[in-house]
Image (spheres, rainbow, N blue to C red):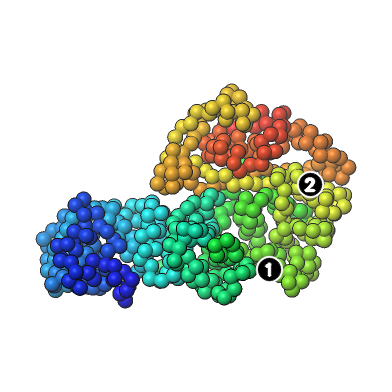
Amino acid sequence: MTNSGSALRSVWHQLKNRTITCEEALQLLVDNDGNVTLSLLDPEVSYRFLREFPDRSSLPPVIPLLLWQNCFYLGSPVPLSLESIRLMGDRTLTEIRVLPVTDKSYANWYRAQSLNSTTQLNAQPFVNPLTGEQDQEDIIEITSELLSRAADQIGRIRTIISGALRNRASDIHLEPTPEGLRVRYRIDGILRDITLLPLEISRRAIVALKVMADMDIADSRRPQDARIGEQYTTGQDASGLGLDMRVSTLPCVGGEKAVIRLLPRQNPFACIEELGFTDRTLAIYKNWLQQPQGVVIFTGPTGSGKTSTLYTSLQAIATEFVNVVTVEDPVEYILPRITQTQVLEAAGMTFAAGLRAILRQDPDIIMVGEIRDHETAETAVRAALTGHLVLTTLHTNDAVSAIPRLKDIGPDPGLISDALLGVVAQRLVRKVCPHCAEPYPPTDDDLRALGIDWEDTDPTAWKKGRGCSRCFGSGFLGREAIIELLNVDDRIRQLIYEGTMTQLHHYLGEIGFDSFRVAAIAKISQGITTVQEVLRVLPYSAMNRRYPERETKARMQVVNS
């Protein structure tokens, strides 16, 4: 029950060994300003005091500091009544003495107690025990404090995972350096330094992670991949929620690097309306999903949100009246009413082989994780022409580039033109933090980067985050998709079959193509994101290609709406 590592460092342990006096112990624990050195507390003292109060709601805000000569020394951020002190003394059969401590010290101690009270991973946001309001944690300070209290290496790994869950991280990076094991979280698509584990425990921490993932701990010379299944709490579901973690290790200079991808099993996908489509593009996209046959292609780099859009779309159309089958690599989320198949190339289960097998399963809707080769592309196109709705992904910079890319892979252009319903290209941009957003007048450089004039925008609607504790000082909180949508009409079908890309771009300028640039201008003009964030995420070609006839109209529609 007692954490032996903490006990050896604790003031209480020194006091029991008579190396310091009680007065010296209290001075070490609480400074003149009321700040408590939590690392010097002993968990045994807390246990002996708190075990007498099964119902913590009846307990005033106190920190058990010391137990000495039948007296509990407690720290409290608020004045306690004589009645409260008497009741605590009667319950513990001890004398009670109270020292004033800061609100912050009590909140930090309370958080540590809450996290240590469960063996599960904990994603519950911190609540200030004095105000009852949700607190934004100092991610670096709290993580370092909790790591110092962890009993073993597996406890440290679980502490790191809990911190990532509480702070909306999608990935955890554990990187060996000459100074120690660097821990980084990817939050809203950006990596952030969290802490540095000491050099002497770096290797042991990686070994502990490999033990949790059932990897070969003796082999550090080759990459390894594995999955971990865990339960975690959120404070709303006491029974715990499922969490899948994909763990990948890579030999590198200084040891092994590990990356943990966090995949909560509960449905993380919203409705289609919340994906980032405009009203115009959403209507077109919904119409595609209602078609009995055809191909819808999603494009974008890794981390652009394609999987979320695909899964959200499948959930919207997976009713009792249709058979939906997928082939994926890997299957990241288990969806209801959908048959999902995992690619396993070592066993001959490729995308092409899986797709051929799916066609014998009487499908109505097919999702192919990625088109990588001629055979997969050919089979997907022919499946669409034989009465199936096919959703798939392709790696291109924008929506228009999907057409020459698909033609290069090999299907007959005539088949492509007949089968293709449309292409969705997307990128994820960080949203301006609503807690610290403030009006931001665009500069000449901003307008020049977007290719617009002052009269084309409403400068009063532009916003930028100044940075606060809720957004880790970045000015951004959360992400939203910027979507480029290519709706394939009869003219585009003709150009796919016998036209050139120059002719296609000219035609798109005539009809009002919903390009990345138009979508970016709309979101910036609405104060959702910033010019700098758009330029960071969108490809250079997207911001420098112009469709003037339509874009001026689109910008004015945004301003007037």
Residue for point 73% across, 69% down? 345
In front: 557, or 198?
A: 198
Q: Which residue is mark 2?
A: 403
| Residue 515, image x, y percentages | 68, 38
Q: Which one is nearer the viewer's eye here, 152 or 61?
A: 152
Q: Earlier in the sequence, mark 1 or mark 2?
A: 1
CA–CA distance in space, label 1 to label 2:
27 Å
Q: Quadrant of residue 355?
A: bottom right
Label 1: which secondary element: strand
Q: Is residue 144 above or below residue 228?
A: above
The residue indicated by pointer 1 is: 342
Percent coordinates x, y for residue 349 in the rendering: 75, 70
Give the residue type that dot 1 points to: Gln
Where is residue 305? Give x, y as percent: 61, 52
Residue 53 visible: no
Please tell me which residue is depicted at 61% across the width and 69% down the height of the picture.
Answer: 221
Amino acid on which the number 2 mark rests in the picture: Ile
Identify the residue shown where x is 23% and y is 71%.
Answer: 13
